[in-house]
Amino acid sequence: MPEPMTVSFPPAFLWGAATSAYQIEGAVREGGRTPSIWDTFSHTPGRTAGGDTGDIAVDHYHRYRDDVALMAELGLNAYRFSVSWPRVRPTGRGPAAQAGLDFYRRLVDELLSHGIKPAVTLYHWDLPQELEDAGGWPERDTALRFAEYAQLVGEALGDRVEQWITLNEPWCSAFLGYGSGVHAPGRTEPAATLRAAHHLNLAHGLATQALRSVLPAHGSIAVSLNSQVIRPLTQSPADLAAARRIDDLANGVFHGPILHGAYPATLLEATSSVTDWSYVLDGDLAAINQPLDALGLNYYTPALVSSPESAPKGPRADGHGSSTHSPWPGSEDVAFHQTPGERTAMGWTVEPGGLYDLITRYSREAPGLRLYVTENGAAYDDKPDADGRVHDPERVAYLRAHLAEVHRAIADGADVRGYYLWSLMDNFEWAYGYEKRFGAVYVDYATQERTPKSSALWYASAARTGGLPPVERV
Ligand code: PNW
């Protein structure tokens, strides 16, 4: 697709960066914080690369002022971060921890004083361990506790934060946390996976209601889905059916009830041997299907699937980490293929057009909602040069190509209001530990020194000009 000569984004476009609490904060024992499932998981031998944990991470809890100053230097006008549930409500059900709430109040005030618009994610995977001990997301009670927590944070920050995101990528929480087990809590139970998905949906709906009751009228509520771009290997009926099944498990299981008030009939049918869905109680679907203001889309790479019959023999390549357990309950037989093309350090194929497809799909799926790309980015093997600079031309190319697709979607009528690059800085990449670097800013983990990579400088000039500067200019 040839790019227009000059690309210019709407003047109010948000040029943001994103992070999450457990990936950056550290300070896991300060201010009354109790452990989350990620503390437990990362401290369990064999769960993360090199046994890495978020104990210190990039020490953002202590360095947030410098980090906000860095964002301001880079000309960002938006920042998406997550609140750590066990930091503001230890154990998941106790009284609020004022020290935790104060940290987020200070962070938000610092952002606002630099003209940076905060977007708060309430759940980016750090469930209080005590709630997991009581059964975790497969249990209904977790959704009720989440709504209380959402209200508490809404009350504390609602006067200064306009943009709210209930859940980040509930697919990962349910399917990687309870299905393949590559994420915390590391359980591998197909039926519990779908129960978890339902209770995450319920948590979103109840939290949305709780937030509405405490936020000012201009408060904006969204959910960030890692809506996956699923492509069939061929147009054969069998491959199309395989793609349909995976699309239901990846996307429809969340956007069905959240946006349309129902689970797809094809999903219920394809999972009937795994679960009877009896935990979907009367009134749940209405509770989940709350009016929203915006939708967050996270995009990295598409998936290419086929029916088992048409699958060439070889290793599975579904990009979801290594586990002998499938994250696809009832569709374990569907074959995943490596999408051809250049790949990042995660092994994820670079396919900018997938972002266009995703945005235009959700423009149709969620008419009237503002859209935000709440995550997009890439890991590369970045290393400082002898002069201390970090050159990452692949990431510059990745960002530029994906932003061009965002622009194309806007030109074709999609209401995309902003883009949050994942991630502001290198951080704890979950099961991959510190091995994978997604940051626009390089972090030397030995000294915690931050160095903007050339991609950060390029992104800064994009943000400053509202366009996509040529790559040579960095
Ligand atoms: C997202 N998958 O995670 C998260 O929201 C971020 O916290 C994370 O750092 C980022 O993307 C990069 O990985 C994902 O296996 C993890 O499909 C795994 C998958 C997708 C997203």
Image: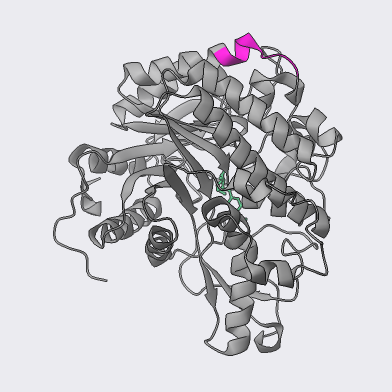
Image coords of residue 20 (percent x, y): 55, 34
Q: Residue furthest left?
A: 5
- In magenta segment, residue 98: yes
Q: Above or below — where is 20 with respect to 95?
A: below
Residue 39 seen in this snapshot: yes
Q: Determine if the magenta segment contains residue 4.
A: no
Provide residue 52's location: percent of width, then percent of height.
Answer: 70, 37
Q: Is residue 238 above or below residue 216?
A: below
Residue displayed at 53% across by 86% down: 234
In the image, residue 24 sits, relative to residue 330, either above or below, namely above
Q: Is residue 14 above or below residue 280?
A: above
Magenta residues span 94-101
On the image, which quarter does residue 184 sit in? Answer: top right
- In the shown orientation, is residue 256 left or right of residue 343? right
Query: Which quadrant of the rendered structure holds the C terminus?
Result: top left
Q: Nearer the viewer, residue 394 or 469?
A: 469
Q: Note whether residue 56 is visible.
A: no
Tell how many labels: 0
| Residue 139 in picture, x, y percent from top left | 80, 42
Q: Residue at x 70, y 50 (%)?
A: 198
Q: Quadrant of the N terminus?
A: bottom left
Residue 425: where, in percent of width, then height? 47, 35
In the image, 137 versus 345, the foreground residue is: 137
